[in-house]
Image (tube, rainbow, N blue to C red):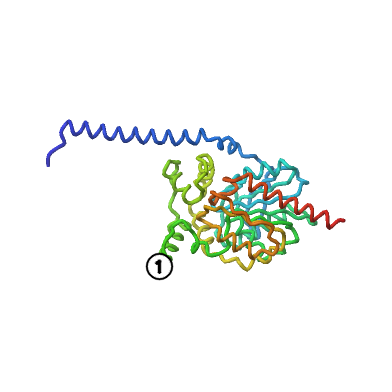
Amino acid sequence: MRSPSRNQLIWGAAAGAGALAAGALTQWRFSRSIAKDPAGQELQDPPSGAPIEVISADGTRLHAERFGPSDGLPVVLAHGWTENLTYWIHVIRELSGRGLQVVAYDLRGHGRSAGSGDYAIARFGQDLEAVLEAVVPDGQRALIAGHSLGGMSIAAWAQDHDVERRVGAVALLNTGVGELITESLILPVPALARAINESVAVHGFLGSRAPLPRFSSPISHAIIRWVAFGPTASPAQIAFYERMLLAMPPTARADVGIAISEIDLYDALPRLTVPAIVVAGESDRLTPPSHAKRIAEMLPQLERLIILPKTGHMGPLERPREVNQALLELVDRMRSTAAAALS
């Protein structure tokens, strides 16, 4: 076997150096695109609220924070899978700035809340009840909003609790309550391949325990954009969510993902007997608009079904103005209902 010549070694070294330089340039341009994104300014320095420790029915410790005046109309926010309470940055700023008492909490296994050996969806409903007991005084009612897994938590809560005792309105954002894998558009395939698609979605995506890359890259951004965002999402918005995703422990991420894949909570929807809005993204591959339409049909007091154009699964990040406006409409509805009851 002939040894490589001196020229071959030189050319090989040059090619390797060129590849490294090209990779470094690509990474630099990628980092610059995030740094120059105007949306990045709005996503810097998420507000810090007054901490609240909540203990759920099974003893799991939940971290919550209160923003705005403690005597304002309460708004309770439940984020989605692989997120944390800072996901609500735009909602927290807008609603607390309008004098509302906004309480956001980390779901179990997420953010600063404790992990658990039990991630059944029913547990997430019990967690919401514990938060409501901690922050909504007797005689008052809150607006509750849930994104993705947060919306599923609301449905699980409604299945086993008296909705109207502590809640006056509900917002279900980019969520589904059943058949999540069947209707997912992450891996669009013919009907004959549906069983394979479901297996890949559960074990290769939702239930994967594989560690994620520790550093952001153009490839990771492209994947996250495809899965979770719409075509107009900005680099800073994707990076903001990616930091939450990378911070979640792989085991908790997988266990919660498998629990999500198995939910069937359609029977809980008629129990949400308060004014409600449903928001979906036109380009949402995780919970397509078909989920929102079915949920809307089953809610007793639907106020509005909103399909946001060119929007993926991250409606509150991608379209904060529209989401905040919809939530404020629910607040106005609650206030007018309360005023009518007193007259």
Residue at the front extreme of this rendering: 309
In the picture of the structure, the residue carrying the numbered disc 1 is 192
Instruction: Report the amino acid beneath label 1.
Output: Leu
In the image, taking residue 16 as reference, residue 237 lies left or right, namely: right
Out of 232 and 101, give the one closest to the viewer: 232
Left or right? Give the position of 322 relative to 207. right
Question: Which residue is nearer to you in this view: 296 or 13?
Answer: 296
Image point 87% across, 56% down: which residue? 343
In the rendered image, the quadrant that contains the N terminus is top left
Q: Position of residue 2 (x, y in %)?
A: 12, 39
Residue depicted at 63% across the width and 60% down the height? 125
Residue 251, position as x, y percentages in the image: 49, 54
State which quadrant residue 133 falls in.
bottom right
Q: Residue at the far left: name it.
A: 1
* x then y, percent, for residue 249: 50, 50
- Label 1 Cα crowd, 10 Å radius (few <14 / some 14-19 / many 20+): few
Q: Describe residue 244's horizontal placement relative to residue 331 as left or right.
A: left
Residue 78 % position (x, y): 63, 52
Marker count (numbered): 1
For numbered disc 1, what is the local secondary structure? Answer: helix
Residue farthest to the right, as pictured:
343
- Where is 72 relative to 291, above or below? above
The answer to which quarter of the image holds residue 142 is: bottom right
